[in-house]
């Protein structure tokens, strides 16, 4: 019985693998990046480094702990001939200090890098040439881009099942972009997996509050990237899809020229 289940499990695993591969909005992730997608912002690089460092530290800690367990299992077994207790280390001050201090140091190191990086990721300096107002609603998005103070026509979408059909946010490469997130209904979450970042969009946060802003610097990686809502917000939550298109500066200038706010088209 058990043997017959193996091919069935293998077939199921294969089916799952192909089913995942068919979903066209799942970014490619490989082991060299710790299964994260290839980032398209400078800030994504910070996240990737923090992720790598945390895994290296966790794996090193795991290796030491498992090594010590195996060492104790092999070399400190109860000997059949001797019945007496091994030397006891209760109230041994140096050892107790050691196992208090080592975890404290480890947590402090994690805390230091996490605090340093979250501060960098939350930094908004206000001088980004491109500013995007993101309005989330049940169940799509409205993007209003302002370039050097000049507005463009808002892009609004409806619920869709393919992100290519959702509203598209066009952004230039190698440029600082500031986002301002707003919603009037329920909590949504703005997520472009390739940013390696998401931010909840919460109703009621007043304009100008730093909690609704974040900033990225796009890398030179032109392409169309899927975006989604990452906070269950109602019946069509899963269809709250959009895309971000990164284009060279010249193409972006042209896009802005043909989509100026108030123009006829
Ligand atoms: Cu939503």
Image: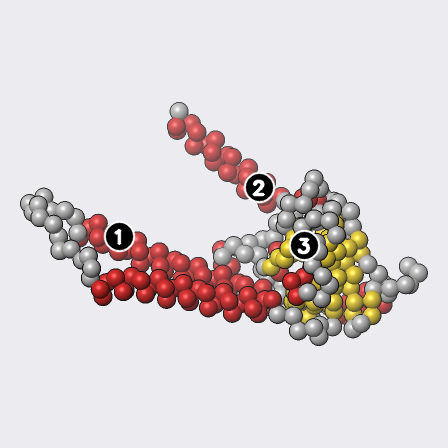
Which mark is in front, 1 or 3? 3
Q: Quadrant of residue 134?
A: bottom right
Which mark is in front, 2 or 1? 1
Task: Please say which color scheme the image uses.
Answer: secondary structure
| Residue 83 pos. (x, y %) | 8, 45
Residue for badge 1: 69
* Side of 136 relative to 73 (left or right): right
Residue for badge 3: 202
The Cα atoms of the two marked residues, 1 and 3, are separated by 47 Å
Extreme residue toward the top, this view = 1
Disc 3 is placed on an element classified as loop
Q: Can I make out residue 155 in this image?
A: yes
The Cα atoms of the two marked residues, 2 and 1, are separated by 39 Å
The Cα atoms of the two marked residues, 2 and 3, are separated by 36 Å
Residue at image location 60% in from the left, 66% down from the top: 122
Residue for badge 2: 18
Callout 1 touching callout 3 (CB < 8 Å)? no
Disc 2 is placed on an element classified as helix
Callout 2 touching callout 3 (CB < 8 Å)? no
- Indicate the quadrant containing the N terminus: top left, top right, bottom left or bottom right: top left
Q: How many marks?
A: 3
Extreme residue toward the right, this view = 264
Label 2: few (<14), some (14–19) or many (≥20) C-alpha neighbours in 10 Å: few
Q: Which mark is residue 108?
A: none
Q: Can I make out residue 164 in this image?
A: no
Q: Is residue 41 above or below residue 73?
A: below
Residue at image location 31% in from the left, 58% down from the top: 64
């Amino acid at each position: 019985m058990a043997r017959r289940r193996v091919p069935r499990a293998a077939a199921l695993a294969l089916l799952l693998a192909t089913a995942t591969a068919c979903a066209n909005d799942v970014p490619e992730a490989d082991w060299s990046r710790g299964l994260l997608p290839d980032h398209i912002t400078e800030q994504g690089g910070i996240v990737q480094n923090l992720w790598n460092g945390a895994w290296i530290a966790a794996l090193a800690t795991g290796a030491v702990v498992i090594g010590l367990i195996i060492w104790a299992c092999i070399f400190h077994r109860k000997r059949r001939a001797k019945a007496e207790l091994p030397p006891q280390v209760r109230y041994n001050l140096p050892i107790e200090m050691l196992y208090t201090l080592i975890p404290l140091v480890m947590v402090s190191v994690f805390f230091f890098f996490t605090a340093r990086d979250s501060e960098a990721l939350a930094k908004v300096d206000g001088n980004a040439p491109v500013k995007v107002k993101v309005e989330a609603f049940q169940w799509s998005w409205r993007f209003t881009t302002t370039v050097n103070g000049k507005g463009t026509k808002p892009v609004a979408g409806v619920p869709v099942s393919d992100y290519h059909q959702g509203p598209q946010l066009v952004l230039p490469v190698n440029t600082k972009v500031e986002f301002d997130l707003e919603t009037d209904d329920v909590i949504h979450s703005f997520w472009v997996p390739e940013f390696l970042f998401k931010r909840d969009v919460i109703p009621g946060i007043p304009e100008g509050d730093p909690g609704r802003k974040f900033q990225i610097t796009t890398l030179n990686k032109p392409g169309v990237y899927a975006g989604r809502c990452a906070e269950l917000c109602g019946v069509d939550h899963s269809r709250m899809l959009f895309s971000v298109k990164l284009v060279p500066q010249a193409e972006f200038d042209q896009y802005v020229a043909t989509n100026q706010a108030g123009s006829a088209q």
